[in-house]
Image (cartoon, coloured by chain):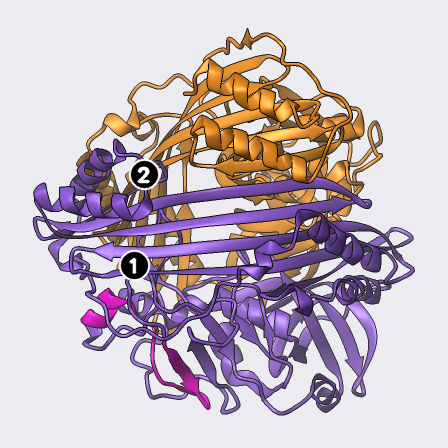
Amino acid sequence: MDRQALQNQIIKEALEQGFTDCEVFYLGGESFEVLLMEGEVSNYENSSEGGVSFRGTYEGRTGYAFSERLEEDTITFLIEAAKENAMLMAEEEREELFGGEDYPEFNGYYPELEQVCVEKRIQLAKRMEEAALNGAESVASLDYCVLGIGKREVAIANSLGLNISYTKNFASGYVSAIAKSGDETKKGSAFWKGTNWADFDPEETGRKAARRGAALLGAGTVDSGTYTAVLDGKAMTALLSSFSGVFFAENVQKGFSLLKDKVGEKVAADCITLRDDALLEGGYASVPFDSEGVAGKNKEVIEHGRLKTFLYNLKSAKKDGVRSTGNGFKAGLTAPVKTACTNFYIQKGENSLDELISTMGNGLYVTDFMGLHAGTNAVSGDFSLSAEGFYVENGRIVNPVEQITIAGNFYALLLDVLAVGDDLYYASSGKGSPSVLAKNIAVAGK
Amino acid sequence: MLTKSVVENTLSAALGTGADFAEIYMEQTKRNIISVVNGKVESAQSGLDYGAGIRLFFQNKAIYGFTNDTSEKNLIRIAREAAAAARGDRIYQLQGWRKMNLACMNPIRIMPDEVEKRKKAEKLFLATEAANKYSPLITQTRTGCLDIVKDIFIANTDGLWAEEQRVRSRFTVEAIASSATEKQSGHLGPGASMGFELYDEIDVEERARESARIAVTMLGAKPCPAGRMPVVIDNGFGGVIFHEACGHSLEATAVARNASVFAGKMGQQIASSVVTAIDDGTIPNGWGSSAMDDEGTPTQRNVLIENGILRSYLVDKLNGRRMGANATGSSRRESYRFAPTSRMTNTFIDNGQSTTDEIIGNTEFGLYAKQMGGGSVDPATGSFNFAVLEGYMIRNGKIAEPVRGATLIGKGMEVLQKIDMVGDNLARAQGMCGSISGSIPTDVGQPMIRVKEMTVGGRG
């Protein structure tokens, strides 16, 4: 069934069957991906998909249901399941629908990106692979070499008259090289994500991955102890991503964040300004509106160390008597509206990475963390993670380091940052950070 | 799910591109999820996953496409689009059908989608109350009930025609204990290939109290000291160590690309001789059990390591072609959105000779990891990391004070060689394993084991 017609039909039938308001959220997409192995296409993927998530108020309570089957016979299932689910919900948890507002202009869809033919895309992937294989002597094989295009369409229609949609697309390339020396194996990776193939330099991406892997060979460990460390943009972004939930009002309200009552107070070093910007030009997570139809905004979450705001959806905003910050997102069709970040990043500072390393003098330069889904406690802020990087002596990188763990607490780390670099890095999720210099990093080595 | 003519026309179109093998996988999954936070229903979701995936092989090359528009026209379009990336030099013919008769691995007593949601929510309220009653230090709780009924259909150009219904249920509980400055949590998530009768097998209140006990114990714990030391890992979820440190590196996905530390090691001693490890997709009602895998090969019991010697990898059809090995019934996928590949099912270290008293008693000083959290591994380098959810120091052969925030890191090869004692109390526990073919239910398991030396991370 046609998407718009299906949305309208569901709304009509739901209202007839006792819902006092309702909404149909559509999420669709297309994707293409090619995986290379030894100069050959080893896997190739092409997909198109779409589904709807329904929510509405029945007897004063909010009920949800979703379906990836977009046929008329699905409508009864959605309405009946949503009614039964609504009856489990407390009335005070009722979700408000949103009638709409003025939306920012949004350019996220680049049709030219899809017009490059398949053979050309495979060629680009092959060039990236070759550059990675030739990028360092110690690199003889690759772990992954993938090139892809993704397109995503969001359309929301509700009984308050809201009827909005947007489409966005991205191309990306990712390569991970395996560097070997004797029994030692290391991996280095690099990615590109963008909206114009002309910006993609497959050779540079490939070489970067190879050099990163090769640089880690010959790694030793360090003595256990407390260090001053430079966490590079990728490593810091990984931590920031793991703990982003502590800035969500709904977590604060439920007691899952230690930032309760801290708005206006100092929660980070003065050099830290943290933003969530839905409107960032070219941002990987830029959107004109969230999953509730609230317009995207650019917010300062932390300004020079002071907590300015939490991130809100409509429900948590109502509880605190404020306006939604446009952070009400569904993680997919199956998920209810929760809170999520858009382009969530620490603003860049003035020092180059080299300056941070030389200011540090002696310490660790950390380039990667592993095991973030297990080694972090989102409630207490504690983390204990396997890390990789380099040992720095007198401001110079002397040796790669492996088999160490770094333990700390996210809340404490924000206060322990001494300086912020000018090399802002964005992960493909839109979260980002420059390199930071921080004290009190507990390291377990030998 | 699909008519014979739609299947035949789609697969014929696929073979028309010159593919030497084509497969169609279709699923419809009904799912229900209820989550209760601090005693209130936070969300109740029901839904239908629906779609099909088409896979083509051109020798060792694979093409995959998926869609949830399962009209004949669209399926044929997906099959033909593959030709943009590959072309075979001869056209293969469709064979006749061979209907697969599968043994019922997981008998279901109470279909979960026929149980009132109210009844499921009541189990969560009971658990919440039990956790809260355990101690006034428990300040928050999260509990969840989820169930799926997944109907799958697979047909391929080798003549396979197979269907299976998979039913799974899981209960999760997390309790958080707080002091003025600290929060610690304990969580458990028992599940099975069962219907609502899961709740006759497990006592949700007892599980909730156990989670609360872990949280309260860890709240009073000091940070774990860091360094290299012997580590005793308890049974059940402790098996995540084998899953991460070794299991992933035995998957053909990594082995066929020569991106595993265990590639080329068949028949060699890769672990200490006290280690025997098994992956068994046929355990009745096991969380990771099914009658067939997600490309239609019947599941089986695979001995991976026998007395330290590598006996088998986990092999799917595509990587089997690349390696010249037979499929082991290990090809799995989260849904039609993913091409299947070799994965674990129910994986465990088998019982050994030592008693738990002997293991603890013979450890002068070390860490006792009673409950493990999750972890991850890079199969290319073998480097892994685990979080310890509930840990204690061992002093003079006795379990001493609790410690929190411990992490275990190491390399798969090394740790397997360093397992020097294996207990006799094998138990399994449930997890979700994420990898390139998505997030799938897997069991981990082991008896208590001792690793004679490991790097422990912590802040103490």
Relative placement, left or right, of A41 versus B264 is left
The residue indicated by pointer 2 is A1
User: x, y (%) of residue A160?
Assistant: 16, 60
Q: Which amino acid does label 1 sit on?
A: Gln
Considering depth in this image, is B88 or B352 the residue closer to the camera? Answer: B88
Considering depth in this image, is B218 or B108 the residue closer to the camera? Answer: B108
Q: What element carries label 1?
A: strand
Q: Is residue A309 magenta?
A: yes
Q: Is residue B1 above or below residue A354?
A: above
Instruction: Tell me which corner region of the image, top left, top right, bottom left or bottom right, holds residue A307.
Output: bottom left
Q: Residue at x 16, y 55 (%)?
A: A159
Chain B: give its colour.
orange
Q: In this view, does B299 lie above or below B233?
A: above
Considering depth in this image, is B351 or A76 the residue closer to the camera? Answer: A76
Q: Residue at x 42, y 29 (%)?
A: B71
Q: In this view, does B80 lie above or below B108?
A: below
Residue interval drawn in magenta: A297-318
Relative placement, left or right, of B4 versus A197 is left
Q: What residue type is labelled 2?
A: Met
User: x, y (%) of residue B32?
Assistant: 30, 38
Q: Is residue A96 above or below residue B123?
A: below
